Amino acid sequence: MEAIVDGRESAVGAVPSFLSTVNGPEALSTLPAERLPELAEEIRRFLVDRVQATGGHLGPNLGVVELTLALHRVFHSPRDALVFDVGHQTYVHKLLTGRQERFPTLRQAGGLSGYPSRAESVHDLVENSHASTALSYADGLAKARQLSGEQERAVVAVIGDGALTGGMAWEALNNLGAAQERPVIVVVNDNGRSYAPTAGAFAEHLSVLKSGGGAGACRNLFTDLGFTYFGPVDGHDTVAIEAGLQRARALHRPVVVHVTTVKGKGYGPAEADKADCLHAVGARFPAAGNGQTGAKAPSWTTVFGRELLQLANAREDVVAVTASMLRPTGLHLMAQAFPDRVFDVGIAEQHAVTSAAGLAMGGYHPVVAIYATFLNRAIDQVLMDVALHRLPVTFVLDRAGITGPDGSSHHGMWDLALLTAVPGLRIAAPRDTPRLRELLGEATGIADGPSMLRIPKGTATPPIPAVARMGGIDILHRSPHRPLDVLLVPVGPLAQAVLDAAGLLEEHGVGATVADSRWIHPVHEALPGLAARHRLAVSVEDGIRTGGIGSALAQKLRDSGVSTPVTVLGLPPAFLPHGPRAGLLARAGLDAEGIARTTLDAHIAVSSARTTLDPAMSRRPR
């Protein structure tokens, strides 16, 4: 198949003729079984071409082609419920449910989502792409079917071995296995990996089953929990999978069908990709004339990973924890150098946080690297297991703010509103690479409580020097020879847009100071005094504007008796769609033009109010 993707023409070629006849899952029921391998091959060609043209999850989808064909031949969606855990492996499902023509728009603004989307199709039941949730959805659906007397409508949950490392999946299995009267079919897609090799004792147990140690009716972990177990089944043999699914459906009780697959199946580079670089890919064929040359600047994640390695070299007490995101969070560098000091706990964010608390109790300083969106799942552990005990744990939240093409479930926009409520938690947001290095060192030097750094997805910002430092606050800009009209307070990497906005404000005769407090929460003690010298303060953050840093700044000014009004700029409290980071920030008014426009309007309103209160002010020289 490699020859198919070596040239640009294949990436923009026509939809394969055989696949184009499948306009919905009902078309599969009349397809002779002997034609299935041909259809599977065409689907793989389609995926390699289209996904490398647009970017997206390639390896997971190549591995589930035959499995998805079998699911749609045995079950009748949407009457039968098909719930896919995580959802990044549903491209084949999308192809088979009438969305082939939209694939050129995959993960593009306004286009096809990279995850299931209820707005796209009645065949997409669940669009939350956080792992380990499908079994709980299935449990609730089965209960609803039982209550309404519709138990002939099957409930099927497809979950990977990686997602089964999450605690929520086991909470669901505990309930599903005990309800013999509710027929739920759990399809375990076992490829030995999630983003990385599956961690823990359960992965070892699956290996035993795959080797024949628990095949057929033999006792194993699933049967002990009350399930009938079928497997292991070759996940690339559609006929064999169909037979297993038909048997499972006929039993009308909880069943596990253990399917073994190969991630990246049918595409040599993806099959051999042990580092999971082809788990998700960027667009391989840029538009004509848009090719980039020269050395690429490092990402925020890369800069963090390199700096953490330097810290680990200098300090033996520094350890690291992640939840099945070793390479995506930059921890692989430290893991290669110090494998005994880096702990991948599987897709188990709650356990990761409380395990880090235990490491801190034991005298180490853990650095917990997790995507911002995934730490939402462990807020209670941050609050009660770390902060309550005032433990020195440093959290590094990758993909904070707008992430781009992965959409609503992956935008890291909730962390500030949630975590500013945690007592004793100190939060930093570096504006550039030198500040990332600086603040990581400061955070890991804190011994009396937790700390947090948030970094965005994308290329790291080059140095933005300060023109002065005032009590720990970096002054990035002061308008020369102008009044102190507006104090602009950016959060982290939005500093550059705010600096550009300050220039636009000056063109309208409005003087501005730009102040980066580096440590954004609790609000810096010097900020109220600085704000008091200005007519207006404007905070700019890439989290939701309700309950975030701007809200905390306004409260701090009120508590300090400072009357300077605060305008809070941030993201709306809504689920934002997928699209380019720059475009989504601009839509929220968080680019230079939007910041300047809103600030100018607020400044005019404040000035008008002051003039109304004191008409003589309109005659005073500025």
Image (cartoon, rainbow, N blue to C red):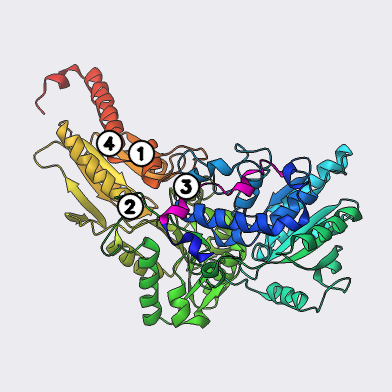
Q: Which residues are magenta?
A: 8-25
Amino acid bearing label 1: Ala
Amino acid at the residue labelled 3: Met
What separation in Å lies between label 2 and label 4 (alpha carbons)? Answer: 16 Å
Q: Which residue is mark 4?
A: 593
Label 3: element kind:
loop
Residue 301 location (% of width, % of height): 40, 64
Question: Going by the image, does 121 lie left or right of 317?
Answer: right
Please identify the quarter of the rendering in which residue 540 is found: top left
Residue 531 visible from this viewpoint:
yes
Q: CA distance from mark 2 to mark 3?
A: 14 Å
Q: Residue at x 25, y 63 (%)?
A: 294
Q: Depth-wise, is mark 1 or mark 3 nearer the camera?
A: 1
Residue that numbered label 2 is attached to: 493
Q: Specify the quadrant that holds the N terminus.
A: bottom right
Q: Is residue 422 visible?
A: no
Q: From the viewer's perspective, is residue 98 above or below residue 428?
A: above
Q: Disc 1 on helix, strand or loop?
A: helix
Q: Amino acid at mark 4?
A: Glu
Of 100 and 3, nearer the camera is 3
Graded by Cα atoms within 10 Å as few (under 14), some (14 to 19) or many (20 or more), the crowding at tag 3 reads many
Circle 1 residues within 10 Å: few <14, some 14–19, many ≥20: some
In the image, 620 versus 485, the foreground residue is: 485
Which of discs 2 and 4 lies nearer the camera? The answer is 4
Name which quarter of the figure residue 582 lies in. Answer: top left
Q: Disc 3 marks which residue? A: 413
